[in-house]
Amino acid sequence: MRAGYGCYAWLALLVITIPTCLVLAATPGLTRRRRVARGAARLFFASIGSPVRVEGGAVEPHYPCVVVANHASYLDGIILTAALPPGFTYLIKQQMTRVPLAGFLLRRLGSAFVDRNDHTDRRRSARAMLELAAQGSALGFFPEGTFDAVPGLKPFQLGAFSAAARAKLPVLPIVIHGARDMLPAGRLLPAPGSLRVRICEPVRPGGQASARELMAQTRRAMLVHLKEPDLAADTRYIPE
């Protein structure tokens, strides 16, 4: 049954993605394209019986802001696309540009890319995201940078919080539930399950709050709702 569901899920994604790419290729305007992508993401999860349920607060009252979310699955980006307003620029690892269809989609949606193994490229991306933040753009990050099969919140990279602190934008912590169970690292076929997105209270860079202080406050807020270990505090955890 699991294999059948998994094959159906990938088929549904393909059937929805191909016409979405054609529509995005012909659609002018970044905001319009992002709305198309949001509708397609919602259609995908509805078609596999796992519509994304949004809990907690709303994003719009805090816009523009810097969203940071936990990262546990390749589904996370599609989940945020379905759950959040269509105004976010996401920082994506460079390797995704080589994935068929996905690279095209991400470029048409105005995503920013970074090679996490290239320090020069990371600095360039950080400057670009800071400029976007200073212009009032809404930014989306997975501050763990990657994911693996070990449950828990991994150490954060500082870039998202530096951009928020310097641009004086609120950080909006978001916790994704269910993605790890549906499609964890190392598994080929997704399993049925429920998906929830918890929008936490914003962390505001008041006064002289540093990027590291913003990062620590955001991490604490996410851990309250994540119900997974804090791997940054676990000396036994060794990143893959």
Image: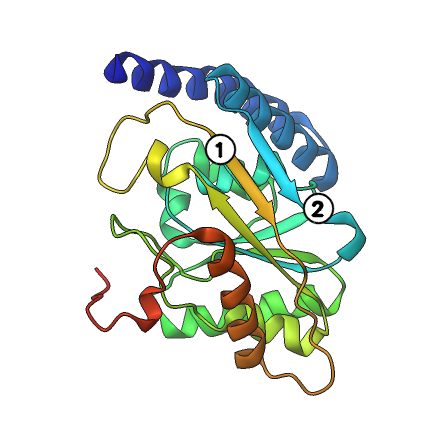
Mark 1 residue type: Leu
Q: Is residue 125 visible?
A: no
Q: Residues within 10 Å of mark 1 (few under 14, many from 20)?
A: many
169 vs 174: above or below: below
In the rendered image, the quadrant that contains the N terminus is: top left
Q: Residue at x 59, y 26 (%)?
A: 42
Q: Nearer the viewer, mark 1 or mark 2?
A: 1
Q: Horizontally, is 104 left or right of 186 in the view?
A: right
Q: Residues within 10 Å of mark 2 (few under 14, many from 20)?
A: many
User: Who comes first in sequence, dot 1 or dot 2?
Assistant: 2
Where does the image place residue 15, in percent across and percent down from the top left? 46, 15
Q: Which residue is mark 2?
A: 87
Mark 2 residue type: Gly
Q: Which residue is mark 1?
A: 195
39 vs 153: above or below: above
Q: Is residue 218 visible?
A: yes
State the SS at label 2: loop
Q: Residue at x 73, y 70 (%)?
A: 134
In the rendered image, the quadrant that contains the C terminus is: bottom left
Q: Which residue of the protein is positioned furthest toward the right in this rendering?
A: 61
Where does the image place residue 160, in percent across and percent down from the top left? 55, 67
Where does the image place residue 17, in percent across and percent down from the top left? 49, 23
Residue 67, quarter of the rendered image: bottom right
User: Could you tell me if the residues under marks 1 and 2 are in contact, i.e. CB atoms within 8 Å?
Assistant: no
CA–CA distance between discs 1 and 2?
22 Å
Observer-nearest residue: 93 or 144? Answer: 144
Q: Residue at x 56, y 49 (%)?
A: 111
Q: Horizontally, is 64 left or right of 6 in the view?
A: right
Identify the colour scheme used. rainbow
Observer-nearest residue: 121 or 151? Answer: 151
